[in-house]
Amino acid sequence: MSEQVIVEPAPAKLNLALHVRRRRDDGYHDLETLFAFARDGDVVTVERGPAALTITGPFAGGLSNGVDNLVTRAERAFCTSFGIDAAHAITLDKHLPVASGIGGGSADAAATLRALARLHGMSVTDERLFALAATLGADVPACLLGQAALGHGKGDALAGIEGLGDMPALLVNPGVEVSTAAVFARWDEEDRGALARGDTLERALAGRNDLQPPAEQIAPVIAEVLTALAGQPGVRLARMSGSGATCFALFGSFAARDEAARRIREAAPGWWQLATFVQ
C-alpha cells in the first residue's frame, strides 16, 4: 500500500462492564468501565486528494456524509489543531450498526485520527491526539487507544489492562437504534458500587451494565437478545454493551460460539450478528 494511502481498522468496542457511579454537574456521568475490542468492525481509508467522505458497506445507508459525520468532524479538528493545510479523501466502509453501543462512530473517528496521524508523520500515541479525541466524544479516546483498558470519569481517563487474548465472542443486535441520551436519562441514579478486583475476565463476570435496565425499558427486545445469548452452551458472559442495543457473549471455545451463532440465526434471522474475537 502506498504511504499516501492509509487503511485503518475501526474495531467494535465492547463494555465488558459499565458501572454508573453518579451524575456530574456538567451533565455527564462518572463511570467505571472495562473496555475491550473485537478484531472486526469498520474500516477507514484516508489519502491526500479532493476533500470527500465516501461511505460504503452494509450500514452506509444509515449515515450522512455531511459535516455532522463524526469522521468529517475528526478530520477537520485534526487539521485545525495541528495546522495541516491539506485536503483528504476518506472512505468509511461501514459494517457495524449505527447507534448500537459498540462505539461505531467513535471507532470511526478514532481510526480517522490514527490514519491522519500516520499520513502526516505523527505518532498515534501523541498526547495531543488523545486530548483532541476527548473533544469528539467520551468513547473516542478509548477507541483511539484500541486495546483493553479501564475507563474512569466520562470513560476517557484510561489505564491499560490485560486483554482477553482473542476470546471467542458473538455480537448480536436486534435491529433497533437506542439513544444514548435517552438511556442515561432513565438511569435511576443509584450507585451500585465499584468494579471488583481481579483479572479482566473476573472483573467483568463480577460486574454489570447499569445502563441495561433503562435500555430495556426503551427497547424490550434487548432482554430477548440477552436471554438468547445467555442460554447458549459454553457461554462465559452475556451482557449488553454501552447504552445498547448490541449485546455480546463470550465463549470458552470457537465451536461453542459458532454453534450459538447458527442457533440464533435460525431463531431470529432478522437480527444482525458478528462472530469475532475479543482481544
Image (tube, rainbow, N blue to C red):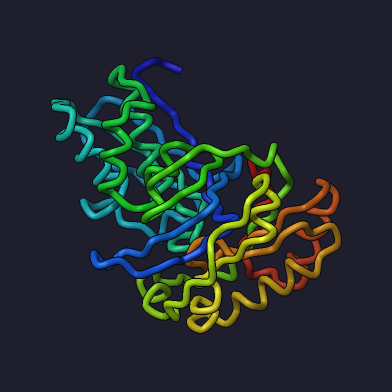
Q: Residue at coordinates 35% horizontally, 31% vertically from top-left?
A: 46
Total marks placed: 0
Q: Can you give x and y, in whole percent of width and height, for residue 23 in the image? A: 34, 70
Q: Residue at coordinates 42% horizontally, 80% vertically from top-left?
A: 186
Q: Quadrant of residue 166?
A: top right
Please give left or right for residue 99 compared with residue 119 in the image: right
Please give left or right for residue 265 compared with residue 183 in the image: right
Q: Can you give x and y, in whole percent of width and height, for residue 15 in the image? A: 55, 55
Depth order, front residue of 140/11 = 140
Position of 275 relative to 161 (above/below): below
Depth order, front residue of 219/175 = 219
Position of 185 relative to 42 (above/below): below
Q: Can you give x and y, in whole percent of width and height, for residue 219 in the image? A: 52, 80
Assign the C terminus to one quadrant of the image: top right
Q: Can you give x and y, in whole percent of width and height, for residue 192 in the image? A: 53, 71
Position of 204 relative to 54 (above/below): below
Q: Residue at coordinates 64% horizontally, 55% vertically from top-left?
A: 204
Please give left or right for residue 172 compared with residue 111 in the image: right
Q: Residue at coordinates 46% horizontally, 53% vertically from top-left?
A: 103
